[in-house]
Image (cartoon, rainbow, N blue to C red):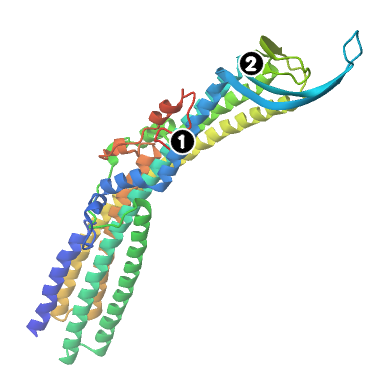
Amino acid sequence: MSNRAGRPCLVARAVRVALIATTTLTAAALAGAPMHRAMADTLEGALAIAYQNNPQINSQRAATRATDEGVGVALSGYRPQVSATASLGEQYLDLLSKPTGSSKPETAGTVATAGYGLTTKQTLFNGFQTASRTRLAEGQVFAARETLRTTEQTILLNGATAYMNLLRDAALLELQRNNVKVLEATLRQTRDRFTAGEVTRTDLAQAQSSLEAGRSSLHAAESSYITSKSAYVQVIGVEPGKLASASPVDRFSPPNLAGALARAASQNPAVTTAMYNVDAAVEQVKVQESFLYPTLSLNGAMQKNYGSATSLTSLESLSGSVVGQLSVPIYQGGAEYANIRQAKETLGQRRLDLDTARLSVQQNVTQSWGQLEAAKAQVDATNAQVTSAEIALDGVREEARVGQRTTLDVLNAQQALVQARTALVTAQHDRIVASYAVLASVGGLAPQILGLHIETYDPVVHYQQVRDVWIGVRTPDGR
């Protein structure tokens, strides 16, 4: 009898050590992880891979580069327009003229004609339209950069969440596996004691029921792990290996809620994007107003012709001109006025969008901060809960060994410990994810702040490469 009673206690002690180890949020090993995945086995490394390779980020980078070209389009208004023409052909003429002296009244024949020409146009003044268009395009570039920063923060937060979800579900899966082992050992012990007549069939049925419930929880944990693994691959882009534990990033966030709100008001990319959209809308109004101003341009032309389409005797001609042209709009059907009113309404909308963004960011910061504080308290509470549950389980087992507790009491205490450890794992997960959410809400979730050891993408580089390019169809990367 003492041997039967002692064997489950030894198993329980071994299992307890394994369960405590899982609360550090380390995942089960996945054998044969390739070397190129090693970087993704830490949270920082996984975020670095997502930052470099996530297609959503790279798509937004391409969109930002496309927006850069809008400045070049706007600047073209300062530059001359030059075009060349050339023609070659044969002309048949049949001319009937008034007779004079001995000249023939009718001449007919064919003549070969050729010519080439060059025309230029330089705008001198267009109601400041080019300047306004350039500032508008620059505002759109700045807004696109902030949109890119929003995308980067979203992917980094999603990456941290996916990493921690997989880490949590791996730990919970290991908890359930160990719980099933303990319940199997308890069932064996109960069956032996039932055979010896120490417990009733009810005790045996309760042990069997608890084991089946544990196996059901194990299957649910396996399903959650598979789901989290697929989400990890989607965001990070590689298969996970043996994930290392992670730590919060509170040190990068403001120390209090007031500081977080102040920082978010100026640095959150949702707010800064809305600010630049307002600036762009202001310039759009000026662009539309420029259509009410006169335009002044300098036009040049040169034409060299061989032969003539109107004379059989002309051999060649050369003409050239330089003309200043002033155009004053008087009335163009009213479209220009409608465009101005439309642009002003859009400006009002962008200002309201800015107010909406500020309120949304304020709410998001407050909510994230509250979740972080709650997660911190939850970690402390669940730590105490686990300690108490372990003490309670040891006591109930000892009391059951001497007949003062039933098998059901032992099973209930075991499940209480599993639930406490599950709550602790979940709280530790929530604690870290909430710290990343707070950092994102204040606009600080960036590889430079996190200290990721990678080369960061700088959108200014491409902008400077294409801003003042006059000719060429190749992009800076050679495409």
Name which of mark 2 and mark 1 comes first in the sequence.
Answer: 1
Q: Residue at x 14, y 79 (%)?
A: 401
Sort mark 1 into few (<14), some (14-19) or many (20+) by Cα contacts within 10 Å: many
Q: In the image, is residue 377 above or below residue 365?
A: below
Q: Quadrant of residue 425?
A: bottom left
Using the rendered image of the protein, determine whether residue 41 is visible from the camera's viewpoint: no
On the image, numbered disc 2 is attached to which residue? 127
State the residue position of label 1: 64
Residue 181 appears in the picture as rendered? yes
Q: 272 or 288: nearer the eye?
A: 288
| The disc label shown at residue 187, or none | none
Residue in view at x 47 percent, y 38 percent: 63
The C terminus: image quadrant:
top left
Considering depth in this image, is 416 or 251 the residue closer to the camera? 251
The image shows residue 402, relative to residue 15, as above or below, that is below
| Residue 321 percent location from the top left of the image | 67, 10
Residue type for callout 1: Thr
Residue at 29%, 41% in the rendered image: 250
The image quarter in which residue 79 lies: top right
Q: Seen from this angle, which residue lies furthest top?
A: 101
Taking depth in this image into account, of 416 and 177 the one nearest to the observer is 177
Image quadrant assignment for residue 248: top left
Disc 2 and disc 1: Cα gap in Å? 29 Å
Above or below for 175 versus 110: below
Q: Is 70 above or below relative to 454? A: above
Residue 212: image location, x then y, percent: 30, 79
Taking the image as shown, residue 130 lies to the left or right of residue 372, namely: right
Which part of the image, by quadrant, shows the N terminus? Answer: bottom left
